[in-house]
Image: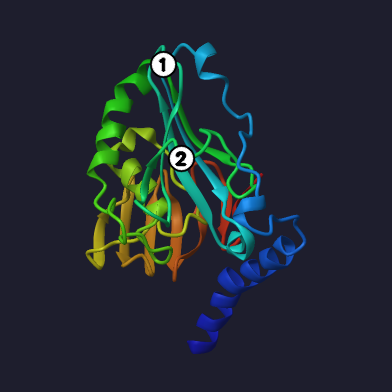
Amino acid sequence: MTRRFLLLFSVLFLLPLASHAAWWSWQPLAADWRRADWSSAALLPAAAIEPEATVHVFAARVGRWRGVFAHHSWVVVKEAGAKAYTRFDVVGWGNPVRVNHREADGRWFGNVPELVAEVKGEAAAALIPRIREAVKSYGYSEYGTYAAWPGPNSNSFVQHVLAEVPELGHALPPTAIGKDWRESGLYAGWTPSRTGVQASLYGLAGISLGWVEGVEINLLGLVAGLDLRQPALKLPGWGRVGL
């Protein structure tokens, strides 16, 4: 049994992580945050020419060696007729919760973000007040409450928003370390999307099974599993690998 567990652990966790670390080491990475590109990735139209309400969730690889493991995620909203987007995310310095800390669709440490979720029109207009309330209700918004691992961190924050507004109907990337963090310790109940069940121990070990989240096995913040709704593998380091 021990040999089988070690073999399974190597195949599901160590090999994908090692191969992604090797690939990542060849990527052109910014040496530090001062020299990184934080500019808009031009993923959103100018707010002034987008008349309807919109909601977007983005995620981008974090900087330097940490990009082997993890994404940073954030939420962007815009009411109908608004002349600017509003971005909410959590950072690891100063007061954690930031508003318009960077460009709405800005690169993170030079890495282009990927779109996790998008809602437009009347559906977005109905969700935006609830998203703003979810941001206000986040329980770790004071100085000193941020912890990169296992959480609460930027992904714990966005997962909180997704759980409070399950109609967003999307899951964070499997590399969003901190999304499964639980202060209460042992958790057993619904997944954030309310489409399945989840068991977790402080976000350090757990399992999820849901239509939105798919099948996920979490070990020390690393996730392996399957995306059921849009078929793909979920691999440590690589994240979601679909067709």
Residue 235, x across and y down, in percent: 58, 60
Inspect this view and state whether residue 194 appears.
Answer: no
Point out which mark residue 82 bears. 1
Depth order, front residue of 46/205: 46
Tell which tag, 1 or 2, sits nearer the viewer. Answer: 2
Residue wearing tag 2: 101
Which label's residue is closer to the chain start, 1 or 2?
1
In the image: residue 129, left or right of residue 75: left
Residue 9, x across and y down, in percent: 54, 76
Specify the quadrant of the image occupied by residue 198.
bottom left
The CA span between labels 1 and 2 is 18 Å
Indicate the secondary structure of the residue bearing disc 2.
loop
Q: What residue type is labelled 1?
A: Ala
Q: What residue type is labelled 2?
A: His
Answer above or below: position of 174 versus 149: above
In the image: residue 140, left or right of residue 79: left
**Would you call the spot at circle 2 few (<14 residues within 10 Å), some (14-19), or many (20 or more)?**
some
Depth order, front residue of 171/126: 126
Point out which mark residue 124 bears. none
Answer above or below: position of 84 versus 5: above
Specify the quadrant of the image occupied by residue 207.
bottom left
Specify the quadrant of the image occupied by residue 94.
bottom left
Q: Write the residue at 41% across / 59% down.
A: 178
Depth order, front residue of 122/52: 52
Q: Write the residue at 56% across / 47% down.
A: 60
Q: Write the residue at 45% across / 59% down.
A: 216
